[in-house]
């Protein structure tokens, strides 16, 4: 279930969007959004609150970007998410959380197909124009080559992706888990990631997976 403060919850149950929660969120993100007409908040835990987001912001779109579970698990486990995402420290919890979110978002897509969009990271890297077509259509935009020049932008970035968004679109993140094999084999098995046959005989890890 999604939890909201009582004034915001009462407004949502009464069918009224916006309210105190929307006001609080806009104030909290004002220093990042500045005067932009559209702002993007890519905090992973947003996926837990999609129902609240859709009800609070009638003009909001939610884009669920799905990435290979093995790549996502290794990426999260190597970063300090302990405060906001304690499940990242435990492979079983991480895998379970990922599966719960996938089911949760699939149900929301069926209920609000025009507002909850789905995109696979691997498809985006392989064919960005085709992969982004439904997203741009939902935004009322058309494809422009400048879309691929995102990395030249000067907007503020306050996430672990700060380095990636300053680089052109690339496939370096695809199959990145292989660089940590065979050291990561046990970790990925506990996560529940489906690996290709004989993956455990991959190259030695360049960086050791920190223990849970």
Image (tube, helix red, strand yellow):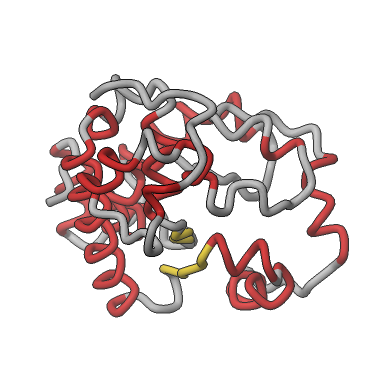
Image: 196 above or below 165: below
- The quarter of the image holding the C terminus is top left
Q: Is residue 210 above or below residue 141?
A: above
Which of the 4 image quadrants contains residue 199? bottom left
Q: Residue at x 84, y 51 (%)?
A: 149
- Residue 164 x, y percent position in the rendering: 67, 38
Q: Nearer the viewer, residue 38 or 201?
A: 201
Q: Position of residue 46 (x, y in %)?
A: 36, 45
Residue 114, x across and y down, in percent: 45, 77
Give percent across and percent down for residue 198: 38, 58
Q: Nearer the viewer, residue 69 or 160?
A: 69
Please tell me which residue is depicted at 69% across the width and 37% down the height of the picture: 35
Q: Residue at x 66, y 31 (%)?
A: 34
Q: How many marks?
A: 0
Between residues 69 and 111, which one lies in front from this camera angle? 69
Q: Quadrant of residue 100?
A: bottom left
Q: Is residue 188 left or right of residue 116?
A: left
User: In percent of the image, x 44 and y 60: which residue is there?
Assistant: 66
Please give left or right for residue 160 compared with residue 72 in the image. right
Residue toward you, 197 or 211: 197
- Residue 76's place in the image compared with 97, above or below, is above
């Amino acid at each position: 279930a999604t939890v909201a403060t009582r004034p915001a919850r009462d407004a949502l149950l009464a069918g009224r969007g916006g309210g105190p929660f929307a006001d609080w969120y806009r104030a909290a993100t004002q220093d990042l959004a500045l005067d932009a007409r559209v702002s993007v908040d890519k905090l992973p835990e947003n996926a837990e609150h999609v129902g609240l987001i859709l009800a609070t912001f009638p003009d909001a779109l939610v884009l669920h970007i799905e990435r290979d579970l093995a790549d996502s698990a290794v990426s999260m486990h190597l970063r300090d998410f302990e405060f906001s995402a304690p499940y990242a420290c435990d492979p079983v919890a991480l895998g379970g959380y990922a599966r719960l979110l996938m089911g949760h978002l699939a149900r929301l897509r069926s209920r609000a197909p025009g507002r909850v969009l789905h995109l696979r990271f691997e498809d985006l890297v392989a064919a960005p124009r085709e992969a982004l077509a439904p997203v741009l259509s939902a935004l009322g935009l058309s494809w422009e080559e400048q879309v691929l020049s995102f990395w030249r932008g000067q907007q503020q970035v306050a996430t672990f992706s700060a380095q990636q968004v300053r680089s052109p679109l690339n496939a370096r993140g695809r199959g990145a888990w292989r660089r940590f094999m065979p050291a990561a084999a046990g970790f990925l098995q506990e996560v529940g990631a489906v690996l290709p046959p004989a993956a455990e005989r991959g190259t030695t890890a360049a960086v050791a997976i920190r223990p849970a």
